[in-house]
Image (cartoon, helix red, strand yellow):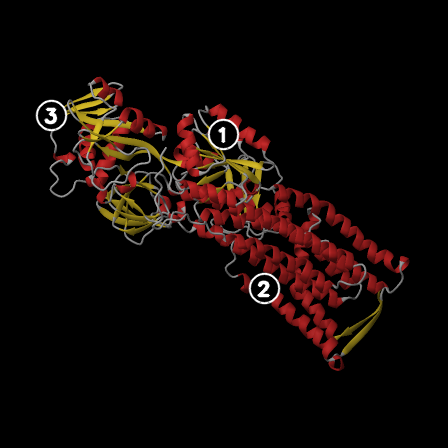
Amino acid sequence: MELRLAVPDMDCSSCAGKVEGALDREGVLSVDTRPTTGVVVLTYDSDRTDVEALTAAVEGAGYAVADAESDGVADDLFTSPRAVATAVGGAFLAVGLVLEWLLPGLDPTFATLGGVGFLGPWAVTGASVAYLLAVAVAGPPILRNGFYSLRGLSLDIDLLMSVGVLAALLVDLPFEAATLAVLFSVAELLERYSIDRARTSLRELMELSPDEAVVIRDGDEETVPADSVATGERLAVRPGERVPLDGVVREGSGAVDESPITGESVPAEKEPGDEVYAGSINEAGYLEIEATAPASESTIARVVELVEAANGEETRAERFVDRFASVYTPIVVVGAVATAALGPVLVGGGAETWFVRGLTLLVVACPCAFVISTPVSVVSGVTAAARNGVLIKGGEHLEAAGDVDAVALDKTGTLTRGELSVTDVVPLGDREAADVLACATAIERRSEHPVAAAIVARGEEAGPEPDDENAADDVEVTNFEALTGEGVRADLDGETHYAGKPSLFADLGFDLSHAHVRSDGGVVRERDGAEGDADGGNGTESDAVAEPESCDHGRYLDLASETIPRLQAEGKTVVLVGTETELEGVVAVADTVRPEAAWVVDRLHELRIDRVAMLTGDNERTARAIGERVGVDEVRAELLPDEKVAAVRELAAETEGGVAMVGDGINDAPALAAADVGIAMGAAGTDTAIETADVALMADDLSRLPYVVDLASRASETIRTNIGASLAVKALLAAGAPLGYVSVAMAVVVGDMGMSLGVTGNALRLGNVEPAEPPTADAEPDESSA
């Protein structure tokens, strides 16, 4: 069985090690500790152990187990018993400092105890009593944790600080003991606060899905816990409310803000039959939704679980730090003991002086700052990405994405929209573009071919002009017939019309090299469809259509040698429309390039990606046309799935860093797996993509790709900065402590508390990285097509 335990106080790798050790017992099959989120996930044999025993084992290691639904964030951290004890201890420390240094004349001497410590007699003064009270109040949590560390044979910060406090007391150094107890307690509280800030970002994800849902049962509305809603039940969602579960709209329509899941800021219009995701916000309109998955299996629930699990995985940097700490800490501890014991003998001077220097070096031995430097960077980066519609499946993948030097992009569905649409309408004879489109729509409406579907969609999008007698919906269509491999035929208001390949019309006897056009005619491109160009008189001339030539009867186009080959060279499918006696027009259909594709490629180059390649199974001519349009560095066309894998590996061999492969997550799966980082497009609602990709762009939005590269690059830089700064400060303190340049207070404040807060604050800056948006505004639309 699987068990999830919330252990809020487990906030570092050392803590995780002690918890793992406590759970290393009979019946436990696996243990996954996630210190950055304060969670332990384990599997166990229920015949050999139970939840109570496992909980007791964790608590026996010194870590309280919270409610299973806890997010690990201490909302009352600075009013907790430890915070209060630390404050009281700090007050006693301040009293001692005042009596000893500012008002020594008021510092009473109560007694002198001789022969107790090897450093000489002890003087029991008001200051020393205040210091001892400070230790008595602030020290117990440290000593308790140190005891658990000793019992678990863990040479961690709790054990080192406990030894330091006790040793200072034994040799009559109450000020040093009080300083350690109070300042270390303050450091622990501040570090916990910093960890909580990182955990809060995950809590924000968890809070996206509402706890309650309004269910329609027997015609009545009933508010129930979201967890109790069964698949297939109807939910009512009013404007301003969050969608409680994944589902499908059955009644109503409205705009739904899906940015919590996909990162897309523009609300999506939803109608019956459309999918909606738990956590999205109904901006306008009443919706009735049929639940398609329980709350525990919603898209946002899977994202939260994967983000939480991702924060438990160690990166290469973390493994390096752990190995370094395992060597660094024992060496410095030995150095601290040697400093205290051998200093008076080898160098000379007072035993107290050298003991304090050894104690200071013992504090410096604590590796907290550089141990937490990587995990807090990972949790900050991964959760920031999730808030912006990008699911990164682990710190390892975040780190790998930061090392990418080459990006391979699939064409269909990635650089292109993956859906056919009309790109050009060329009216012939006395026809107008609207006539051609309406005629083609009427003929193709009964066809099931993808090209026909694109034409019908374009015709319906354009809509009929007022009082338009040629509107497709007003035409009587009879005798429809699909001409296998050629096109379709149907009677429109009793007259036979055709729509199909150029060869169909060549067989009908048309001279495609001499097709007359109106003297003021033009070409309607996809971008003009919603404008006034649909009348055919103000169309924008296509680059693929040459200027009409003059003849004795007006002007004409050479469809066979000029227009059709040029359209096909752009990767477009050409459909001719006409009757048995007249050519009416040309319609070109293609999978259009995403408007943001060229911007994305440029942005990747700005982010120092050396090579951007396009990998496609499409033909060379089409691939080259798209590659030139979007600005990729190289194009590899006509590739089978295994050849895409080989291409990814070739790119990896030719670059110093890693290779990221971007595809749809299903048919590009082999290439995604072969890359150092596999990035799936449009993963929201797609179980396969979410589960298999290293990185998933939840929305079908290619503009999030540069954000992934930018965030990962900054995360890698942050991790390197944190580790480097931590090691540099520790090295300086370790070198200065034996020479007397570093005090105990400085070691705690700078080496432990200061650096821990510094690396945490630096890591949390990753949460401020926002996706750059491609130019949208009234920028010139992309006219390219696939």
Whether residue 642 sits left or right of residue 120 in the image: it is left
Question: Depth-wise, is mark 1 or mark 3 nearer the camera?
Answer: 3
Q: Position of residue 53 (x, y in %)?
A: 57, 43
Instruction: Please give the name of the residue rendered at 62% of the width and 39% of the height, measured from the top-left corner.
Output: 25
Q: Amino acid at mark 1?
A: Ala
Is 95 situated above or below 48?
below
Is 397 situated above or below 90?
above
Q: Position of residue 55 (x, y in %)?
A: 56, 46
Q: Nearer the viewer, residue 309 or 436?
A: 436
* Residue denoted by label 3: 495
Q: Position of residue 154 (x, y in %)?
A: 69, 47
Res 83 label: 2
Res 671 label: 1
Estimate how packed mark 1 is, as few (under 14), some (14 to 19) or many (20 or more) residues with alpha carbons within 10 Å: many
N-terminal-most mark, 1 or 3: 3
Residue found at the very far left of the displayed protein: 494
Question: Depth-wise, is mark 1 or mark 2 nearer the camera?
Answer: 1
Q: Alpha carbon of mark 1 to alpha carbon of mark 2: how far? A: 53 Å
Q: Alpha carbon of mark 1 to alpha carbon of mark 3: how far? A: 52 Å
Q: Nearer the viewer, residue 146 or 48?
A: 146
Q: Secondary structure at mark 1?
A: helix
Q: Amino acid at mark 3?
A: Glu
Q: Secondary structure at mark 2?
A: helix
* Quarter of the view holding residue 194: bottom right
Estimate how packed mark 3 is, as few (under 14), some (14 to 19) or many (20 or more) residues with alpha carbons within 10 Å: few
